[in-house]
Image (tube, rainbow, N blue to C red):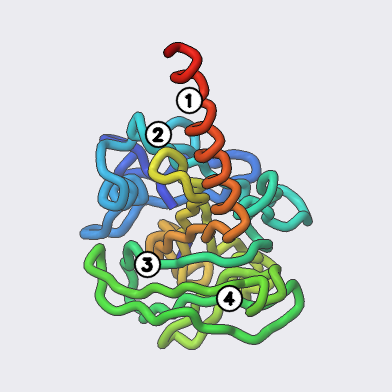
Amino acid sequence: MKKFCMMVAAGVLAASSLPAMAGYTTVGAPASGEKSMKEILEAVYGGTFTPSGVDFSNGTVTATRVNDNGGSGTNDALFGPGLADDQVWNGGALDAKVDAVYAGFTQNFGYKSGTASTAFNSLFTVTGTGLAVTGSASIDMATAAGGTWRWARTGNDGRVFTSRDSDNVDAVDHMITYEITGASDIKTWLIGIEDNVIGRSDRDFNDLVVQVQAVPTPAAVGMGLTTLAGMGIAALRRKRKQA
C-alpha cells in the first residue's frame, strides 16, 4: 500500500506502470475497478491532472513526488526546509484524514514513534471503501511522538508496514508521498500505502491514501495577523498622504 500518491498518467499511462526513476519507487497500474493515483488526485482536488515525470498538476494544484530513499536524513518538510526522503518525519501539530481505500484488508492508520520504537500507535480506523471513506485525527506529534516518527498502517491481515523500508518484513518501500501545493496555504502532503508483501501486491499504492496537513502554530498565526495589520496601516498611511 502506498501515502501520504498520485500517479499513472492519462490515457495510456493510466493502464500501465509509471516509469522507474532514481530515488523513486515504481508505482504499478491499479487493479480493475480501482482508481489510479491520477484519478484519486482528481477526485480529491478537482480538475484533470497530467503527469510530468513522477509529478502531477491540474494547472492550479501540483502534486510533487517526494524522494523515497534520498538518504538517512529526516523529513522536516512539514515545518522545515525540505525532505531528505519520506521514511522518517519530523514535525508538530497536524491533521490527517483518509481520502481513498482500494484494498481487501481493513485499514488502521497510525505511526511508530522516533526511529527505534516498534509499537504501533493508532490514529484512526477507516470506515468504507473506494472514495466513500471516513477516518480522521488531529494530533500534536511533538507531544505524542517526541516530534519524530514513521507513518504506519495495520489491519485484519495482522501486518504493520511503515514509511521506513527497513521496518518492513520484506524490507521494501510501502509508502509514497506527494507534496501538494496550490490547494491551500497550509503545508499539505498526500501519502499512498501498499498493504501487502512484495510478490503478492500490485504495488499501486492506493490501498490506503491519506492527506496530512500541518496545523499552523499560534505564533505563526499571530505573525500572519501582525503582517496583515502592518499592511493595513501602510495602506492607510498612503491614503492619507494622497489626501
Quarter where residue 190 is shown: bottom left
> Could you give the CA–CA distance between mark 2 and mark 4, rounded to whole angstroms?
30 Å
Residue holding disc 1: 235
| First reached walking from the N terminus: tag 4 or tag 3 | 3
Name the residue type under label 3.
Val
Report the mark closest to the observer, 1 or 4. Answer: 1
Q: Position of residue 97 (x, y in %)?
A: 39, 67
Q: Extreme top residue here?
A: 242
Residue holding disc 2: 51
- In this picture, residue 6 sits left or right of residue 45: right
| First reached walking from the N terminus: tag 1 or tag 3 | 3
Residues tagged 3 and 2 counted as in contact (Cβ below 8 A): no
Residues tagged 2 and 4 counted as in contact (Cβ below 8 A): no
Compared with 149, 44 (above or below) is: above
Compared with 127, 27 (above or below) is: above
Element assignment for label 1: helix
Quarter where residue 51 is shown: top left
Report the mark closest to the observer, 1 or 3. Answer: 1
Name the residue type under label 4.
Tyr
Residue holding disc 4: 111
Residue at (78% x, 56% y) in the render: 72
Q: Position of residue 35 (x, y in %)?
A: 28, 55
Report the mark closest to the observer, 2 or 1. Answer: 1
> Could you give the CA–CA distance between mark 4 and mark 3, rounded to whole angstroms?
14 Å
Which numbered circle lies on residue 98? 3
Element assignment for label 2: strand
